Each structure stands twice: as C-alpha cells, then as structure tokens.
Image (spheres, rainbow, N blue to C red):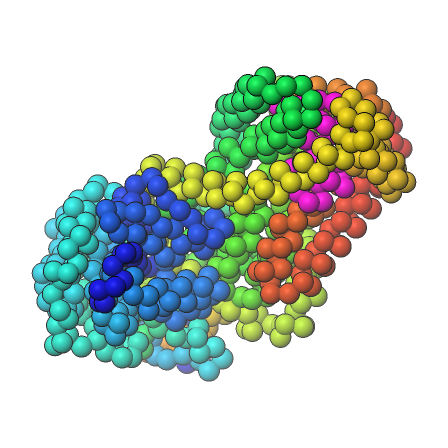
Amino acid sequence: MRNLAQLPPGARARIDGFGSGLRPEVGRRLRELGFVDGDVVRCVRRAPFGGPRVYAVSGAAFALEMHVAAHVLLGPADGDDGSRG
Amino acid sequence: MTAHAAERADVLLVGNPNSGKSLLFSRLTGIAQKVANYPGVTTEVRSGHAGGLVIHDYPGIYSLEPLTLDERVAIERLEKALADPATRAIVCVLDATRLERSLYLLLELLPRARAVHVPVIAAVNVIDELVGPSARLDLPGLSAAVGCHFIGVSAKTGEGLDRLRGTLDHLDREPPWDERCVVPGSIEERKRLARRLSRAYGPRDDVLLRSQERIDRVFLSTWLGLPVFAVVMAVLFQAIFTWAAPLMALVKDGVTATGGWVGGLLPAGLAHDFAQDAVFAGIGAFLTFVPQIFILFLIIGALEDSGYLARAAVLLHRPLGWFGLSGRSFLPLLSGHACAIPAMMAARTIESPRRRLITVMVIPFTSCSARLPIYALLIGGFIPAVSLVHGLVGLQGVVFAGVYVFGITNALLASAVLDRLTRKRMGGGRLADAPFVVELPPYRVPGVMPIVVAAASRSWSFVRRAAPVIFSVVVVVWFLGYFPNGKGHLDQSWLAGLGHWLEPVFAPMGADWKSGVGIVSSFVAREVFVGTMGTLNGLQDAGTQLGQLSTQLQLGGMGLAAALALLFFYATSLQCASTLVVMRKETGSSRAPVLAFVSMTTFAYVGAVVTFHLARALGAG
C-alpha cells in the first residue's frame, strides 16, 4: 500500500487511514489538521537535505517529517477530482 | 451568568496560530499590555484592557487536545478560564483565507462554551485579503448555520473592529444559543462540517495558498533556501549590533545623568557612595544592553509574523537533526542570543520531549546579551584594531563574530553528545520521538506597531525579572568592597581578602585576584562582571566607560593571553542563577541544571587554562 512519503511533489492522492506505528495523539492531530480519511492531499514540495515535505490539505500547507508521512496511507492513484486539496 | 461576578469582565481571545490573533489583540487593547509569565513568542498569555473588559490573548492552538507542552499549558489555562465566572465571552479568531481550518477550532470550542453558558463570537479576520472574483464571505449565512455571532474584521486595516467592540460592550444582548445547531462529536464529522460551511459561505479559491507556494519556491529551495537564510541571519545580527548602538548610548547617558543628579543631592559619605557606585553603576551596566534584547525581540516578532520563522524551522530541521535537535529548536537557539530564559520557555513548542530536553540544556552555550559587555570590554581593549582584507573587515569584528560562532558550535556539539547519552535512556529511536509537524502560514507583511509594542512589553517583563537579581549582587559586591575601611581602600576590603584567598584557583588561567572576584560574583549573573571590575578598579560607572576600564586592566597587568582565556571562560561557562532555576523548572528535575552547570563550568575552566598557556606559548603577553 502506498503512503504519503512516496507521493512525489505535484501529485495528489486520497488518504486511506493511518499506519499502526503512529502514536494515537499524533494521528489525532494529523486528522484535526485535515489529514482525514477520504480527503485529497497534494505534495507541494520537498525541503533540502531530505528534510520535511510540504503537503496541502484542507486549504492549508503543512510540513511533515518523512517518517511521519510514511504512516499516512494512501488509496489508489487519484486524479484531480475538483476537490480543493 | 451570575450577577455577583460583576467586578471583573474577562474576554478570552482564542484562535489558530497565525490567525492574526495577536494583531487583533493589539488593536483592541492599545499599548498598555501585560505579559504573564516569562516573555517569549508562543508561550505567553498577554492581557490588556478594552473599555470595561480585560482581554486575554491565549497562545495559538489547533484544537483542545494538546500535543506539545506549550499547547498543554495554554489549553489548561484556557479551561480554567472557561470555568471562571468572570469570563464573559470568548472571541474565536478565524482566518478568512483559511476558513475551513479555522472553523474546526470554533466547532470544537462551541460545545465547551455552551456547557458553561459563555457566548462565543467568531471574529473572521484578514477580510482585507479577500479580493477578486473568488472573494466571498457570507457572515449572516455562517451565523445562522453555526448558531453564533460572526463578525468580519481586519486587524490590519481596522475594518469591522467597531462592530466587534460594540458586540463586546453589549454581551447581554447576545441571542441565546440556537439549539438547532448541533456540533458533531467526532473529528471527521467536525472536519466535514467545517468543509461544508467553508464551501457554502467562504471564499471560492485558495489564492493565498498558490502565491505562498510561489514564494516558497525560493525560500525552501534546495539551492536558494540556505543562502537566503544566511542573509536573514546576517541582517539580524547586524541589526542587533548597529541599530542598538544609538539606543544603548541613550540609555547610558540617561543613567549617568540621573546618577550624577542624585549623587549631587546626597551629602558625601556612605549614602552618596552607595547611590553612585552601587545603585547607578550597577543598574547602568545592566540597562545598557536592554536595547539589544528589545531589538532581538523585535526581529523575532517580525520574522514570526511574516511567516518566515516556520520556513526556517522546516529548512533547518534536517541539519539540526544531525545534532539531535529539531527544526523547532531553531527559535529557542536564536532567542538564546538575547537571553537563555525566554529561550528555554520557547523550547516548549518542541514536540519531542527528548529534543526539548537537549535544546534546553544547550541553550546556555549561545552567547546571550549578558555576555556582550564582557566581550566588548575584552575584545575592544585587548584585540588590536587592525583591518583585514584591504579594510573590508576589522580584526575585532572578526573575533566578535567568531565568539558567536564558537557559542553555536559548542551548542551543536553538546547536543550531539546529549543525543548519544539520552537515546537509549529515553526510549530511543526516532519513532519514539514526537514528530515534526509544522504549518506553513501565508506570507504577510508584519505590522510595525504591534511588533514594537510586543517587543517593548517583552523587554520590560525581562527587565523586571532580571533587575532585582543583578541589583542584589552589585550591592553585595559593593558592600564587601566598601567595608571595613570605606571608599578608596579596596585593597584592604573584605572583597580583596576573598579575592586573594581565591587567587590560586584562577591563577592557572592568568587571572589576578580582581578578575577572580569578578568571575565569582558573576556566577549569580554574568552581567555583573563589568560592574564588579569597574568597582574593583575604582571606576564609578564601568558600564559606560569600557575603554577606560580596559586601560585600567592593562595597567593592572592583564595581557592578551589572560584576556583570551577570560573570553573563552565567559563564552562557555554557565554563570546565571536564573537560568539554572528556570532550567530546573522546565525540565522538572535538578539533574539537567546540575549536569549543565558542572560540565559547562569545567569545560570553561579547562579551556581557559589551555587558552592562556597556548596563547603564551605562541607569544601573546
């Protein structure tokens, strides 16, 4: 199954749950910020030195460390469905 | 609302980080603000008056479930305030350009406020940025759908503020809750409701997100990101040294003039000597570097409000990670250059407890402004004023910059060591650490007045905390130097006795008994060193006469090697009682401050001894 860390800059995908390795309170915060099941997320860009990546979700941009992004699971490849993400 | 809670009327200002909440607070309350707790960017609750109301500005939060320590503190205080009968209303600040995300917090807050019958007013901020064809904001629609009062405001232009004030002045006219508006219980449902509301009543497009991405292409780019960061930092440090100079001169002159005036009023004798040498010399040496702290707070405020601080954290997250730190360690380490105390408080924003501990422990290595007068004294007096690279830079300036780089290097190396030491004990592995999640706010031009007001109130709060400690030390040193034989007989004083007794300890680093006394007295607060040395060398106001003092030191036999050793010592030792107290409070045990104190002081002493002998061997006097 694909995860958010594998999403290349510029691509969109639909979120499909969280990996079991993520601490519950971190998962909760990610959902509060907009990383909700079924929502579209877009990878905006990567930071230098393999640092955090920037993702756009629910009208805002967030930087996530790669090993956090790896716990956000993605559904099958998704084109632009007109959803703002 | 009960009638007997009538004396005080509190309004709580709540909102997401970067919602423009602080600017709105400044607009509502004017310049008279009070900072609760130590000043710092994200950890304080500020209070101010607006009409008959007291407005409390809470730190920005994303939800009522905390993830980091600063959020936990903020949310606990907020919940306590909610239960307080003096609380009359909550103003929840929303960002009109990020309505969906802002609405989430409002939806979470509403049921809590309803439970205690406190009305919530939604202030939709930054409406001035809603322009163009996609701009839309249906406030009546939102009010009807959510069941609370929505008011469009712009803290920047002042639009809508009168309506907000009017609403706050007549809270008794707020309509009762519309019971038909039910707020869902789960995160997903609240999130979906926020999206539905934002799509039905809010702006139609994310114009800001696109423009912000264009700017990020430069600031977060692989090739330009770091050079831009280096330029920003260079401007910051340049500003601290050059912009602060006229302000520092002003403070100096003011204190000297006041001291002279008061001294003239008093008859010669004990009272006169005390006022002149202890009170004004001591306060003067401390107050002269407050302008630098003010300018640092000013620039940090501007960087935060512009949105760049979050980018710097993202940019530096990986490089700092090599030393066991987080991107969020950047702000504390930067603030440490003003004062370690607010810097340690700022470390509360670091999600990982382990990285937070490491950051707090290494902050004292960064060259805080209390060290500045000492650097100025030693570098100005002992490093030759020759120019390098065809007059482009001076040797003194290079050494100055070198001491700062030395401090940062020490902090990073100490982090790497602590990272190794704590990895196993604190459950190790990067997964056990709380992760790095940072919002990238829109870029905005920061407002001048709010930043100035916030920097001023933060500086003032710092002065209020630090001044009593420094003043007490100066008085004790003066007392020991004045008695038993009075002014002009320092060499027979109790202080001289203490100095001679300690001389063998400091002799290996080339320090005489006067420097020894200076060093010992500065273990309470290092900023007293210059004042103490002034007292010991018979100068009334050493803080304002650095040049004269360094001449005195040279006449007293101090050479370049001893000056370099002192420089090393002050750059690396932990001489600040307040830092140790706050470190204990912030880490929850005495182990961190004891370890930091012992290791840093040992390192400083050994390093100073080595520096002295090395410099001597290389031919320095």
Residue placed furthest toward the top: B264
Instruction: Tell whether A48 sits left or right of A11.
Output: right
What residue is shown at x 39% (from left), y 71% (from top)? B65
Rendered position, B398 above or below B49: above
Read off the magenta span.
Answer: B518-544
What residue is shown at x 67% (from left), y 58% (from top)? B593
Q: Which quadrant of the figure contains the N terminus of chain A? A: bottom left
Q: Which quadrant of the figure contains the C terminus of chain A? A: bottom left
Q: Can residue B541 be seen from the camera position used here?
A: no
What residue is shown at x 76% (from left), y 23% (from top)? B487
Q: Quadrant of residue A10?
A: bottom left
Relative depth, front residue between B90 and B265: B265
Q: In which quarter of the image is residue B498?
A: top right
What residue is shown at x 48% (from left), y 35% (from top)? B295
Relative depth, front residue between B600 and A23: B600
Residue A69 position, x and y percent, is 44, 70
Say if the magenta span includes residue B613: no
